[in-house]
Image (cartoon, rainbow, N blue to C red):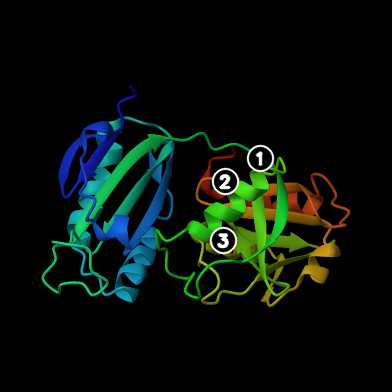
Amino acid sequence: MEKILAVYNSRFSNLHEIKISPLSRAYTFSDSVYEVIPFYNFELIAFDKHISRLRNSCNALNLVLDFKKTTKEILQLISESNLKNGYVYYQVSRGVDAIRSHIFNDNLSIETFGYVVEHVFKSQKLKVMLCEDLRWKRCDIKSTSLLGNVMSMNNAKKKACDEVIMHKENILTEGGASNLFFTDDKTVFTPSISTNILPGITRELLINEIKDAGIQVIEDEFNINDLKNAESIWLTSSTKGVAQVSDVFDLEVSLIEDHPLYLRCNKIFNEKFLCGC
């Protein structure tokens, strides 16, 4: 079995050796949040922003986390893994109940869990499927409650799709595990941040960099008809980077492969954060 370095409640071990109680509220209620922190060429990508988002998620659930300890554990996972490129998954739950109960005991001890794995950052072309957004109304919290995403993405897999683009009554939100961008010949569009959309770190980094390069970015509310007029569509995430969409399974849209504006934005992002890969 592959040895994956992990940490549970500050104790480091191999992933397969860690045992977690079935009464963990992460297991019974998804009463937990998580973060994915990428690193490339031994360098963390936007580490402070990821920690800040984890802090916001914890605050939203009133989870009191020792962020100094968490930061140390994440850095130790990366250091001891000796991996050049990869990511850390880090999860925080409210703790372990004495017996399952919707109303939690205020004296529970915070439960933390993380691991580090290798990841290849590479250019991708994704086939996606449109679907209704089934998720709850606080998608701005990076919660482990991802059943809506799981259902939609596995339905898409049956159609030989790699990802989904979700919408709430035709208003575009985001991908199943990514943020959405699309373009005409000169402007980049992306749904504005709301409680229906996770504030993606890669999304923020990309917007800042391409704006600095003089590219117009419009953050607003968009619908499916807006997407039909797109010349190029991209999805962004910590592990996908900036991945262009090659085909939308159930939408009549004429996408230009390797659209010049996409290529320019992708190059700007890669040269800044992935050393030109």
- Quarter of image, res 69: bottom left
**Amino acid on which the number 2 mark rests in the picture:** Lys
Where residue 189 appears, x then y in whole percent? 72, 68
Q: What residue do we see at 30% from left, 39% from top?
A: 78
80 up-or-down from 224: above or below: above
Which mark, by number, is residue 124?
1
The residue that disc 3 covers is: 203
**Amino acid on which the number 1 mark rests in the picture:** Gln
Could you tell which of marks 3 and 1 lies nearer the N-terminus? Answer: 1
Could you tell which of marks 3 and 2 lies nearer the N-terminus? Answer: 3
Q: What residue do we see at 21% from left, 46% from top?
A: 20
Q: Quadrant of the N terminus?
A: top left
Q: How far apart are marks 2 and 1 (CA)?
A: 8 Å
Could you tell which of marks 2 and 1 lies nearer the N-terminus? Answer: 1
Q: Are marks 2 and 1 in contact (CB under 8 Å)?
A: yes
201 to the left or right of 243 = left
Residue 137 shows in this picture: yes
Which mark, by number, is residue 240?
2
